[in-house]
């Protein structure tokens, strides 16, 4: 039976051919029929996975915890030596050079309220003693959309994923001013396997970790922007779970059950 594979829209959106190659590579390494389907939006992708339609997912940290807690997934492997961080950005040639310059009402661009990037962005504002009542959020469904909102003057601040900032052109980065950034080194995307593939979890983890030692695997890693993968530990998942729980209990809850049968 063919199993279904998808990836965080931020990654599949910018390296789509590489993810199809990853699908083919895993099929051959595991002798396991896989079908890769990309999504363009976070909400659509999350709903499809939680509705039971997918068996292997490359997920952002916040979604990975939801899949583990609510759908019986296991987190297997993460990018080696790479962590998800958040940059709080404004427009470089605008009036905002720091927190002291923020207006009374602050328009904040964020890709989605259901991502770790949004979560940590809110933590940065909390630490700076910015009253949440001053914030008006705009959700763009992509991190590129956050940058676009800043450049077009539709937001004073934006929550920018560090990897998107690093991959942007020098021209784009020159349009942005980094007001603040996280440096926690504990959050990460990961490959998660669902209940129907639980029996293959060990083999899938081994195949992912071994990619950097294989010529074809290294070529695909380069295509999708990684040096390699390493195993996820239970302690790391516990840490992410604590962060997600702290966010949900410390802010207005944003995790809602998807309608049954959602696709």
Image (tube, helix red, strand yellow):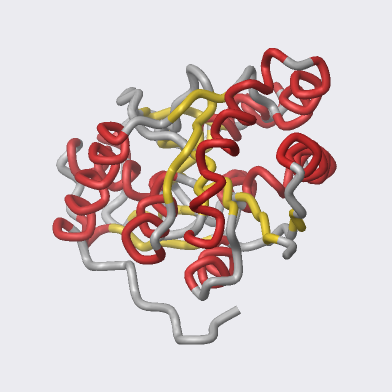
> The N terminus lies in which quarter of the figure?
bottom right
Q: Is residue 36 shown left or right of residue 100? A: right
Q: Residue at x 50, y 23 (%)?
A: 230
Q: Is residue 81 above or below residue 89?
A: above
Does residue 148 appear anywhere in the picture? no
Q: Classify residue 59 as left or right of residue 232.
A: right
Q: Nearer the viewer, residue 70 or 161?
A: 70
Residue 72 lies in what quarter of the image? bottom left
243 lies above or below 108: above
44 vs 141, nearest the viewer:
44
**Number of labelled discs?**
0
Percent x, y of residue 37: 74, 60
Quarter that holds the C terminus? bottom right
Whether residue 91 is situated above or below residue 37 in the rendered picture: above
**Rendered location of residue 62, percent (x, y):** 39, 51
Q: Nearer the viewer, residue 89 or 118?
A: 118
Q: Residue at point 63% right, 21% down?
A: 210
Drawn side of residue 60 relative to residue 225, left or right: left
Q: Residue 128's x, y, as percent?
A: 20, 36
**Residue lying at 17% horizontally and 50% vertically, measured from the top left:** 246
User: Which residue appears at 75% of the width and 19% of the height?
Assistant: 218
Tell me if residue 21 can be seen: yes
């Amino acid at each position: 039976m063919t199993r279904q594979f998808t990836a965080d829209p931020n990654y599949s959106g910018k390296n789509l051919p590489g993810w199809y190659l990853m699908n083919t590579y895993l099929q051959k390494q595991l002798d396991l029929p896989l079908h890769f389907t990309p999504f363009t939006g976070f909400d659509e992708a999350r709903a499809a996975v939680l509705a039971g339609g997918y068996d292997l997912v490359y997920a952002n940290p916040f979604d990975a915890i939801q899949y583990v807690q609510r759908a019986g997934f296991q987190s297997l492997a993460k990018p080696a030596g790479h962590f998800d961080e958040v940059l709080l950005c404004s427009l470089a040639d605008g009036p905002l050079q720091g927190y002291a310059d923020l207006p009374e009402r602050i328009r904040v661009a964020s890709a989605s309220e259901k991502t770790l990037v949004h979560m940590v962005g809110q933590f940065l504002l909390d630490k700076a003693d910015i009253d949440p009542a001053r914030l008006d959020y705009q959700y763009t469904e992509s991190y590129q959309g956050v940058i676009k909102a800043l450049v077009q003057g539709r937001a004073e601040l934006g929550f920018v994923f560090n990897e998107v900032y690093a991959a942007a052109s020098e021209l784009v980065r020159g349009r942005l001013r980094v007001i603040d950034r996280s440096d926690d080194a504990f959050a990460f995307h990961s490959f998660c396997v669902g209940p129907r593939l639980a029996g293959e979890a060990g083999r899938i983890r081994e195949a992912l970790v071994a990619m950097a030692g294989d010529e074809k695997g290294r070529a695909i890693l380069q295509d999708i922007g990684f040096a390699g993968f390493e195993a996820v530990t239970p302690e790391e998942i516990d840490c992410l779970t604590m962060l997600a729980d702290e966010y949900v209990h410390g802010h207005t809850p944003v995790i809602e059950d998807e309608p049954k049968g959602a696709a």
